[in-house]
Amino acid sequence: MTPASMTPAPTTLASATDAGDMLISGRDLKVAAGHYRAEIAAKAASGLLGIFDKWFLRVTARLLAFNPDRSWEDSVRQEIERSPAQNRGFEWDFMRLRLFLDRWRQGRFVRYRDRQRSRIHYFPKYGTEFGGDVLLTCQGASSSLSWGGLPLMKTVFDFAIYPQLLSELRPKSIFEIGSGSGASAIWLADHVAMIDPGDRTGCRVHSVDLVRATASHPGVTFHQGDCAHPEGLFDAAVLDSAPHPWLVIEDAHHNVAAVLAHFHAALRRGDYLYVEDSEIKGDDILRFLDGREDAYLVDTKYTDFFGRNATCALDSIFVRATD
């Protein structure tokens, strides 16, 4: 992931809602909070409440104590005006609650353009809740993550997201564009094996780069190919015979729209497309999605698992939604 400086996030009720579509508010906000509290209650029945759940219950309990005939926005604003020093934390809590519920009500699978429109409420360039300090160090500060003695250039967030996606998808084929040292492909193959060690059909990882990686692993085939010529990245016979579901990972940063379009012909409903380092690939993604916008939906379960876009794949963990 390429680090960069970022503009500070909104920190007040006013700045969180200016110059664009308004955040969830009024009755919609109260209804959404009630629905999410019901989801937390269902979790509590099995005794599994996380830090976020407890924070949500604590904040909404305070909100529910206000006059029910008034909007929470008005009540919070009055509370802050009455005692600003004592309510700085509460103002932040309320803003964060609205941001969360605003995206949660959209559901799990969201169109790319809808996600882009809601970026106005977050860091304007990246649409994430996290600042430059987090992005600078999310691969490791003085050294990067490693796997099998090789540098693994994943963010700490994606290091946790990928295994969950693999566990849910149970891919039969993984195609990685951009091998690097080969650590990522080996890491993926190891995780697939750990998730389902009894699966005798297996999952093959195919990884390609301009220079074929010299690493080796029984579950990985390394290829040589040039993104300038997407049709030659993998032999047609490999693509034709590879079983689905697929996970396709774009991490080569070259001719991105054409590479994605090449795989579009082979992807099927339910396959996943994971575009890494997408903060610099927005135009490429829009070109690829032109005419295909309903075919690929952002899976917010993964892009927002640790908060909105806490991943190198900003709004770009896609599921193929149509054939």
Image: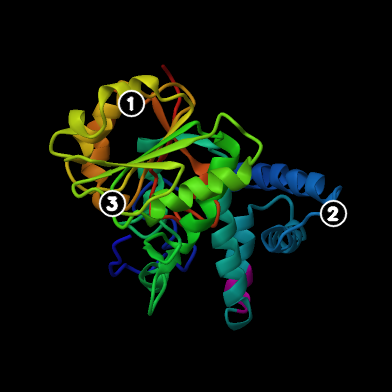
Question: In the picture provided, is 296 more to the left or to the right than 284?
Answer: right
Whether the residues at callouts 1 and 3 have beta carbons within 8 Å, the answer is: no
> Please, is residue 263 above or below residue 249 in the view?
above
Of the two numbered discs 2 and 1 on the same chain, state the one appearing first in sequence: 2
Residue at image location 27% in from the left, 33% down from the top: 260
As measured in the structure, the alpha-carbon distance from the residue carrying label 1 to the one carrying label 3 is 18 Å
Q: Residue furthest bottom?
A: 85
Q: Position of residue 100 (x, y in %)?
A: 56, 52
- Tell me if mark 1 has few (under 14), some (14-19) or many (20+) residues whose alpha carbon lies within 10 angstroms of its own: few
Q: Secondary structure at mark 1?
A: helix
- Return the residue at label 3: 213
As measured in the structure, the alpha-carbon distance from the residue carrying label 2 to the one carrying label 3 is 47 Å
> Please, is residue 92 above or below residue 17 in the view?
below
Q: Secondary structure at mark 2?
A: loop
Residue type highlighted by circle 2: Gly
Q: Is residue 175 visible?
A: yes
> Residue 47 bears which disc, if any?
2
Magenta-drawn segment: 79-83
Q: Is residue 115 magenta?
A: no
Of the two numbered discs 1 and 3 on the same chain, state the one appearing first in sequence: 3
- The dominant secondary structure in magenta is helix
Look at the image and tell me in which quarter the C terminus lies: top left
Quarter-wise, where is residue 289 in the image? top left
Q: Position of residue 45 (x, y in %)?
A: 86, 47
Of the two numbered discs 2 and 3 on the same chain, state the one appearing first in sequence: 2
> Residue 61 bears which disc, if any?
none
Look at the image and tell me in which quarter the N terminus lies: bottom left
Residue type highlighted by circle 1: Val
